[in-house]
Amino acid sequence: MPSVTHDDAPLLADLMPWSVAPLRPGRAWPSAPDAASLKARWDALMRAEGDDREALFEPTRARTPHSAVGQLPGRPSGGTRKLARAEGPCPEPERVLLAPFDEQWLIPDHRLIDVARPELWRVADEHQVFAVETSPPPGATGPLLLATSLPPLLRTGLIRPLYRRPGGTEPNLAPGLLDLLGARLGLPVAPVDVLAWIVAAARPGPGGAAVPLPEDPDLFGRGVELGHRMLWLMRRDGERPKLPGGRRPYVRAPLPARPPTLHYDRDEEALCVGEGRISPVPAAAWDFEVSGARVLEQWFAGRTAEAAPGTLEAIRPTAWPQSWTSELLDLITVLALLAELGPRQADLRPAACLTAEELHAAGVLPVPAPARRPASVLDHQEEGPEGQFALL
């Protein structure tokens, strides 16, 4: 059979047909690297009244303190009363993926988010895996897809949940794809195996991300194993990843209370955080990019960028917390380990594969229109504006 080309390979948009556009937060203060700051910001908002509360809120055309909105699906509500009249404690902050490889905290309150994409929150649970498309410029390095178990607030590209319903049911895959792959490969294929292959093997194509689907079960097995490793590193589930002894990054000089800059010493393989120093840090970890931006620089900026005085965003730790140092060491490790997998990804180029034409002949494509829309959820109520309930 002829070797696969981008024109032959099916598109990710057809293999995982339901996608959700990125969220639009509208304001930065409801998210932060630490939960305590969020509770302090909420308390400051609740103490303010009238015009002061409105100014602190930072209104937009989509959201003001007078907006009437429902509960954020699946989250304990801090209330659906209009924020101008709201009172009480802060809704419990929730861990989210705010930027590539940057896990932060969010006040999960629909009243604070301009465009929250409720259909995404409805399926965000412990069973879910979200694949998030990136937007690498031509010739750039870095992953084409990110994966997370957390609600994703990234603004890089479309979000494709692995499952269409809560509880890890109804995979977001082209109907019939799992059966066809299983029959061609002669082995059982689970939804997460397809996602693992996609994360490892997807390539940029003229019509969007293209996914060659091999007919060689050995190649598919190697790709799935590699993809599961990538998923584990990106999701950071379970045991913390570690580099082999002698390569593990350590703090060689204490990080200052307010590190002003971040730079990398290639000769010493050292990350300089102000006057602090972490080494060894592989150059591949420092150079790791997503959508053309260095991940480590973006992560550092998310904790040190100046906030305007008098705003809620200015309420933040007065000194660099120890927990951020631990997160930074973990991030360096994850990036270094992911970078090492790049050459193995390059080997996942099947000599023969299932083409988009064959998927059409098998009835897998075109995808039926309902598969591109959110699944209906008819078994629970959600609190609507001002405490009213709606059955979905």
Image (cartoon, rainbow, N blue to C red):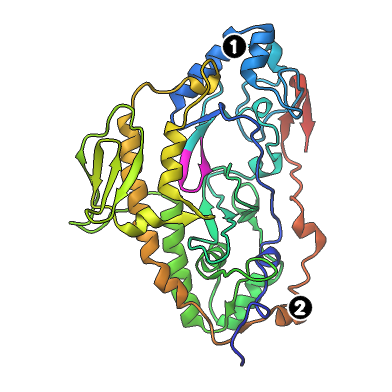
Q: Is residue 239 visible?
A: no
Residue assigned mark 2: 360
Q: Amino acid at mark 1?
A: Met
Does the residue at mark 1 contact the one at mark 2 (Cβ under 8 Å)?
A: no
Front residue of this view, candidates 171 and 343: 343
- Residue 287, located in which quarter of the rendered image? bottom left
State the residue at coordinates (71%, 18%): 65
Residue at 56%, 26% in the rendered image: 29
Q: Quadrant of residue 317?
A: top left
Residues shaded magenta: 95-103
Disc 1 designates what residue? Answer: 46
In which quadrant is the N terminus drawn? bottom right
Say which of 264 and 192 sits in front: 264
| Vertical arrangement, residue 362 with respect to residue 123, above or below | below
Q: Amino acid at mark 2?
A: His
Tell me the element at label 1: helix
Q: Is residue 251 visible?
A: yes
Q: Is residue 100 magenta?
A: yes
The answer for how far apart the CA atoms under marks 1 and 2 are is 57 Å
Give the residue at x 70% y 43%: 119
Determine whether 119 is above or below 304 in the image.
Answer: below
